[in-house]
Image (cartoon, rainbow, N blue to C red):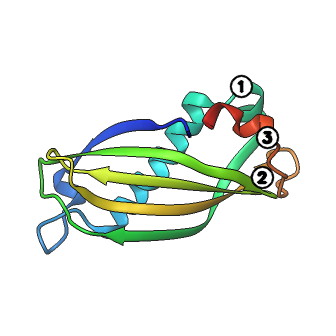
Amino acid sequence: MPSTFTRTFVAAPGHIDELGHVNNTVWVQWIQDMATAHWDAVARPEDRAAFFWVVVRHEIDYRGNVSEGESVTATTWIEGPAQGAKSLRRVEFTDAAGKRLVSAATTWAMLDRASGRLARVRPEVLAAFL
């Protein structure tokens, strides 16, 4: 069972589009914010110092939305073992009633800070997340 990480986001006036709800670009930013916060909270200090992650793919399903002032709870986890330099992260956003509004499968690639090149994700790097 993967370890999950949870955070709450509140829709601010700047997040709202002409349709009166959170803009798609904001959802993408929140997905990225969740991944970064999870890495910063759980990764070993030596791994945070040696590696960083970049997005190679976002797949997002929008099933609902929220308006200004409303909050969502985001939950993220790493799904399965890494594939070379890539790792799959899931993120789900639910409203106050627990209804799933947005879900994402995001593929990230790990890079070595010193060289800027792809780095194979070793099991010990993801151990704390699984």
Give residue 21's quadrant in the image: bottom left
Give residue 73's quadrant in the image: top left
Q: Position of residue 80 (x, y in %)?
A: 65, 51
Q: Position of residue 112 (x, y in %)?
A: 82, 48
Q: Secondary structure at mark 3?
A: helix
* Circle 3 Cα neighbour tier, 10 Å, few/some/many (<14 / 14–19 / ≥20): few
Q: Is residue 64 above or below residue 92?
A: below
Residue pointed to by mark 3:
123
Q: Amino acid type of disc 1? A: Pro
Q: Position of residue 49 (x, y in %)?
A: 75, 33
Q: Secondary structure at mark 1?
A: helix
Q: Secondary structure at mark 2?
A: strand
Residue pointed to by mark 2:
111
Give residue 124's quadrant in the image: top right
Residue pointed to by mark 1:
45
Q: Is residue 44 above or below residue 69?
A: above
Disc count in the image? 3
| Residue ID at (52%, 68%) | 58
Q: What is the CA distance from the residue labelled 1 to the residue labelled 2?
A: 16 Å
Residue found at the far front of this picture: 1
| Residue ID at (15%, 74%) | 18
Q: Earlier in the sequence, mark 1 or mark 3?
A: 1
Residue found at the far right of this picture: 115
Residue 120 lies left or right of residue 96; in this view the side is right
Q: Amino acid type of disc 2? A: Leu
Q: Earlier in the sequence, mark 1 or mark 2?
A: 1
Residues at circles 1 and 2 in contact by the CB criterion of under 8 Å? no
